[in-house]
Image (cartoon, rainbow, N blue to C red):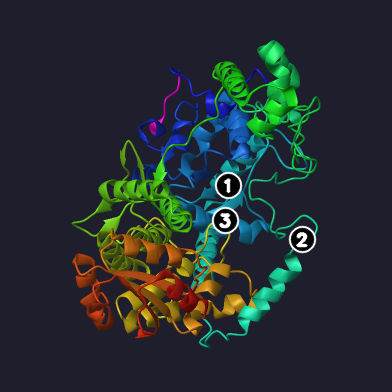
Amino acid sequence: MTSSDTFAQRTPARSDHTNRLAGEKSPYLLQHAHNPVDWYPWGEEAFAKARRENKPIFLSVGYSTCHWCHVMAHESFENEEVAAIMNREFVNIKVDREERPDVDRVYMTFVQATTGGGGWPMSVWLTPDLKPFVGGTYFPPEDRYGQPGFKKVLERIGTAWKENHDKIVEQGGQIVAALRDSQSRPTDENKIDPSILDAAYQQLDRSYDPKEGGFFSAEDADSPIVAGIGDPGHRKTAEGAFYIWTKKEIDDALGDTAEVFEFHYGVQPHGNAPEGSDPHDEFRGKNVLIERHTIAETAQRFKKNEQEIAGLLAKSREKLFSIRAKRPRPHPDDKIIAAWNGLMISAYARTAQVLDDARYLEIATRAATFLRANLYDPSRKILFRNYRGSRSDIEAFADDYAFVIQSLLDLYEASFNVEWLKLAVELQQTQDRLFFDEKNGGYFSTSGRDESVFLRMKDDNDGAEPAASSVAALNLLRLSQLRDDKNMAERARKTIDAFATTFSHFPSAMPQMLVALDYSLTKPRQIVIAGKKDAPETKALLREVHRHFLPKTILVLADGAEGQKFLGEKNETIRSMSLVEGKPAAYVCENFTCKAPVTDQAHLGELLKL
């Protein structure tokens, strides 16, 4: 454990400098609130100042857990000399890319197009009317790694703006026109050929690593931009420093009980990180404490009873927790993002079904309840992007809607609370109204209502997060069955076909969209359980369903109450389903053409294998 801490942990309680970021909600922006740089958040106040003073804008985009963002902040943005140049020559804007993915996406497109690469921190210089003319990523404070120093870059751009003002403004306009043209070209009118599924499979098969497992992928976006950049002086606290231990630290802390603890947790003199899992060589000699043996195995090894071992381990952990509590903590970014919560709600809702564990359903329900109470405006039927202490003013983006709608569908199938399904239908209508491209299909990532973001783009890659259109397509297909709505199915198909050009160039670029394509090409299957949700026979039938892997299937409860009434408004088949001879029954259907209902688990299991 190093004694010095990171920039992320050093936000001062008081400072000689306070800028406009002090009033923001984003933890990343708040980390820069006491820089000597006169930072502004993205907004009209900064834009108006740039126009009034005819100054170019320096836009810096990053996020809390971005290592090189903090390196550049420490080297340059905390530096009084650098800050003086920035304040003299530019209007300086800081953006949290997790809070404003729309701003990040537009200017990252420019940086990638003009430099051939990208990453964070992203550094872009804009005209006062927000047109980019120079872009890059990390800049060292002085000339280093073959890169010009940040001070030199600032001075050169400041001088160029004064000496070549009209040319730069014209260039910025041409760049924006080119970017707009690249996004507005008509899409391939051909429908996606189903054979693309086989092509994508072959492409993924070639990328599989049979030795180590998993698939080869692109380099992490937060990797160093220039080879050799990662010298030890750039990192104040090593990766995982809060959590990892040397054997000597444990020996000193635990004394005679250390041997038992170290056996149980697999502590090694030279560290226990597997070879090849530590690319930055930061775990050398360090141990990650993971239970390597059961209490029974540890008791047998030291010839003690299990109760004695459990007590010894508990006391040892308390001692180490006490020591760890004195270490500098990693900076927590505790903003709550609608899209990411949607992904987690889906994970918990699905886990609750598979493991038949109510704890996971409770967590999913609590999170969804929070989103509905704090990030949803029922009067306007819209979502907001994020929350920290209170709701932000940033309206949600297409991915927020897509991921939250998906989570509500998953939560309905796990809980059969029809209120979640009603909200999903409502939000889908809002997403279609704000983001759907009626001309070419697919979903824009932004609504287009914020005039400061001059490009409406569609994500065409399922990367660290799936694209909004990919998730939305599957949401529409599921909803089209639940609501017996052919318009939703048609919109889903139009969304899938909108990316025909993407698939023709790179079949596996959007694997989540391929899931939607596969779903759309098969006869949709429905499983309807008719019965009261809490009846033992109903629960038994549901457990049988959850035992099977059932992709391309929706699960519905015909409870004879509010849930069935809502579904029956649009779906006549569900409206007519009922108990069989007074017993809960399962209906297995294709296109809502149903086999004879069954009332016992065994028969249901046989039907589900067909």
Residue on which disc 2 sits = 209
User: Residue 38 placed where, x, y %?
Assistant: 45, 32
Residue at image coords 51%, 81%: 610
Q: Can you see residue 352? A: yes
User: Residue 550 placed where, x, y %?
Assistant: 49, 71
Region rendered in magenta: 16-20
Q: Can you see residue 442? A: no
Residue at image coords 32%, 52%: 384
Residue at image coords 53%, 72%: 515
Which label lies toward us, 2 or 1?
2
Residue at image coords 38%, 67%: 541
Residue 347 vs 4, above or below: the answer is below
User: Residue 536 placed where, x, y %?
Assistant: 32, 60
Mark 3 → mark 1, Cα distance in angstroms: 18 Å
The amino acid type found where label 3 is placed reads: Ala
**Few, some or many residues within 10 Å of mark 3 (<14, 14–19, 20+):** few
The amino acid type found where label 2 is placed reads: Asp
Q: Which mark is residue 122?
A: 1
The amino acid type found where label 1 is placed reads: Met
Labels 2 and 1 touching (C-beta < 8 A) = no
Residue 567 sits in which quadrant?
bottom left
Mark 3 secondary-structure assignment: loop
Mark 1 secondary-structure assignment: strand
Residue on which disc 3 sits = 464
User: Residue 189 placed where, x, y %?
Assistant: 50, 87
Let me know if residue 566 is in the magenta part: no
Mark 2 → mark 1, Cα distance in angstroms: 32 Å
In front: 404, or 361?
Answer: 361
